[in-house]
Amino acid sequence: MEVAELASIDWSAPWLAPIAGQGRSVAAAGDWRRSLNLVAEAAHLRNANGRRITFCEAEAASDEPYETGIARTGCVPTRANLHDLFNALIFLRFPRAKAQLNRLQSTAIARDGVCAVRGPVRDAATLIDENAVLVVTERSDVIDLLRGHDWPALFQSRRAAWAGGVNVLAFGHALLEKLQRPYKGITAHALHIALAAGSSLDEIDRHMAAGLDERLTPRDLMPLPVLGIPGWWAQNENPDFYSDPRVFRPAKMRPDRKAETDS
């Protein structure tokens, strides 16, 4: 990975908060992959099968499906790019959740094979792995507004709730890569973590891992335009920021609900 690419990361960005400490250390190391492995070894990271987690060069990985290889060997193919660096840093910060996502995906692959159409569990696990934010809050009113796409109430009428009552953590590594060049339309898949906003990252990791099981579907996730999150983007201090219907879209009505309203 080019030094300039690592130097371009603004570790003070709010979406990098969970991984910023380790990220700075790894980026400053001469051998960033070795640095990742030293942290993983010190933390005794294991996958769901008890295999030690290592971050290996992609060329050293097996030819089997990506998730299958991680489940069997513990080796996470890690190319010299920001996408894979962010994946590794999320692994270090949320090891239980990442191990559980790998278990769900590798189990589904073992059962169904690598199909062109994934089932709901693999679909949801992939969305979380690549593009999720964790919305950590005990405020059901906030989650109801998010699920209903009530953006004016969520981001303006209830704006005060975000200070101390809601903590949003970026989890998806593709999302983090996208946020290297922020633009208004970036939309994450939000997963509700029903804990106090001030919960530790370890508590959040444990709670998240315990909630990821075979009942998981994409319907458990909610779209969230992340630059609308208070404190994440200076421009959203202006209420007009939220007036763009291309980004802050109304909820789609399900066919069954539409039939009810038309009758």
Image (tube, rainbow, N blue to C red):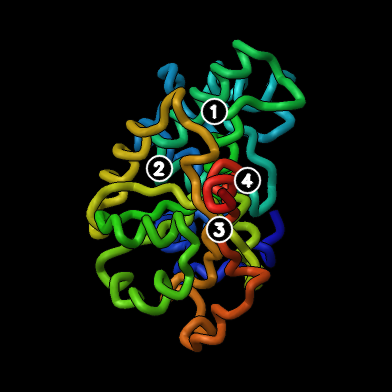
Could you tell me which secondary element the residue under label 3 belongs to? loop
Q: Please say if the residues under marks 4 and 3 sit with CB atoms less than 8 Å apart.
A: no
At a point 71% along the width and 59% down the height, the residue shown is 2
Tell which tag, 1 or 4, sits nearer the viewer.
Answer: 1
- Is there a contact, CB below 8 Å, between mark 1 and mark 4? no
Pinpoint residue 151: horizontal percent, then vertical percent: 48, 70
Q: How far apart are marks 4 and 3 (CA)?
A: 33 Å
Q: Position of residue 4 (x, y in %)?
A: 69, 67
- From the image, state whether disc 2 or disc 1 is nearer to you: 1
- Residue 40: which quarter of the image? top left
Residue type at numbered disc 4: Asp
Please tell me whether mark 2 sits on a helix, a strand or a loop: loop
Q: What element carries label 4?
A: helix
- Judged by depth in the image, the label closer to the viewer, 3 or 1, is 3
Q: Mark 1 vs mark 4: which is more N-terminal?
A: 4
The amino acid at mark 2 is: Phe
Task: Pick out the residue farthest to the front.
Answer: 263
Say few, some or many: other residues with alpha carbon within 10 Å of mark 2 (under 14 / 14 to 19 / 20 or more): many
Residue 23 seen in this snapshot: yes
Q: Which residue is drawn at 51% across and 78% down?
A: 233
Left/right placement of residue 109 relative to residue 189 reads right
Residue type for callout 3: Ala
The residue that disc 4 covers is 84
Residue tagged by mark 1? 121
Disc 3 to disc 1, how far (Cα)?
A: 23 Å
